[in-house]
Amino acid sequence: MTSEEDFFEHIRNQYGSALPFVAYRKPVTGRSPEADGNATVIKAILQRDDKLHQVADFSEKGFVFSPFDQNETAVLIPCGTGEKAPEVMISRFESKKDTSKENENLSEKETENADRDRHLQLVRKGIETIRKGKLEKVVLSRAEAVPVKHKDPVAVFRRLLERYEDAFCYLWFHPKIGLWMGATPETLLRIHDGVLYTMALAGTQKYTGQARVSWGEKEKQEQQVVTDSIVDSLKFKVKSLKISGAKTYRAGNLLHIRTDIQAMLISRYKTENIAPLLRSLHPTPAVCGFPKEEARLFIKENENYDRRFYSGFLGELNTNIAEEKKNDTGERDSELYVNLRCMQINGDTATLYVGGGITRDSDPEAEWEETISKSFTMKRILQ
């Protein structure tokens, strides 16, 4: 196991050499048994060349980075053996800082009025389309450019790890694509020993020190649409389906409604390609809408920007990277997360991506404020 300082120094050197890599930590619930005290396990995969590896059919092994649009190609940082195989590093990350009061007075500054007006207009159009019966829900987003004060992305990543223990935190770089970073609260798909786990996550409130809150009908309806759609997408692919009750879940400075979904995969999906599962699940109504295809087309025609990897998915594909315990059954484990609360960094500018679920009862002003609150997740580590 690599020391913490050597781990980050290797990443810094890899980035300085313009070579692809990903560094990440799973949520607290995904801690390795090796972790103790305040320590969590962090991993990294470092390519030895700048080749751009593309996913052909999701049978590959490595760390996948997939865009929102399923028609676009996903990228892979592969795992393997041999002289040219990427280097895999594992380390413990010790949380040393008390972040409970850090930036507590940091204001959630609004963006330019033009951005606000555009988003309000977009949301109003979404509500109008839903009330005409063409959609039940659509997730509408925007991109916001903010200045980057810290020139070292590895230092910013460490701040992210300190701040968001209960999120999947990552730093991803490829010289032919760019630098991305995020702290997502949402699991798309986890498969281990033939058991599938996913979640329905929707509805948003600001966390003000109290997790016991009341939810309005708009948020409850939005979350139920996500849950029903995910369960329906898993038909004929799983058995012994278990659905938890809805509960309030804290993600940084926000609260959401979450339902956990677990099932046994039918035999063919234990050892065969998981591409059909991914096609069924992604994009979920939590990032796209319902019905899926109608919502996707509305987003494409009206958002007026390219989401790229925002609201796509990322994570370990068909492998437990560098785990000591090997699976000899032929079953292939994956752990994938929805790419939310993320940003792309280019020089002195970070592009933040934020959005929210729109239903017939949505209030445009409230939806705008929700995007402001969500952008705060990334803004607070850039201060």
Image: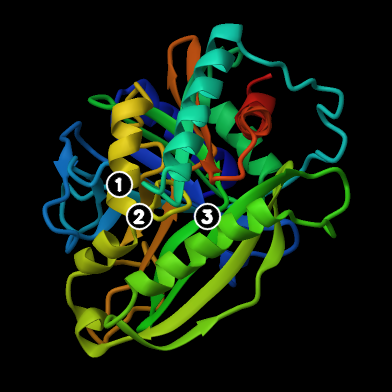
| Residues packed near mark 3 inside 10 Å, few (<14), some (14 to 19) or many (20 plus) | many
- Confirm or deny contact between disc 1 and disc 2 (CB under 8 A): yes
Question: In the image, residue 355 lies at what x, y percent?
Answer: 52, 35
Q: Nearer the viewer, mark 3 or mark 2?
A: 2
Q: Nearer the viewer, mark 1 or mark 3?
A: 1
* SS of the residue under disc 2: loop
Residue 181 seen by the camera: no
Sequence-wise, the earlier of marks 3 and 2 is 3
| Residues packed near mark 1 inside 10 Å, few (<14), some (14 to 19) or many (20 plus) | some
The CA span between labels 1 and 3 is 23 Å
Q: Residue at x 16, y 42 (%)?
A: 53
Residue 376 picture quarter: top right
The CA span between labels 1 and 2 is 6 Å
Residue 161 picture quarter: top right
Residue 255 placement, left or right of 223: right
Mark linked to residue 291: 2
> Label 3 belongs to which residue?
186
Q: Residue at x 50, y 67 (%)?
A: 227
Question: In the image, residue 14 lies at what x, y percent?
Answer: 36, 30
Depth check, front residue: 68 or 334: 68
Question: In the image, residue 31 lies at what x, y percent?
Answer: 59, 65
Residue 378 placement, left or right of 199: right
Amino acid type, mark 1: Glu
Depth check, front residue: 3 or 114: 114
Pick the quarter of the image with the C terminus: top right
| Residues packed near mark 2 inside 10 Å, few (<14), some (14 to 19) or many (20 plus) | some
* SS of the residue under disc 1: helix
> Label 1 belongs to which residue?
294
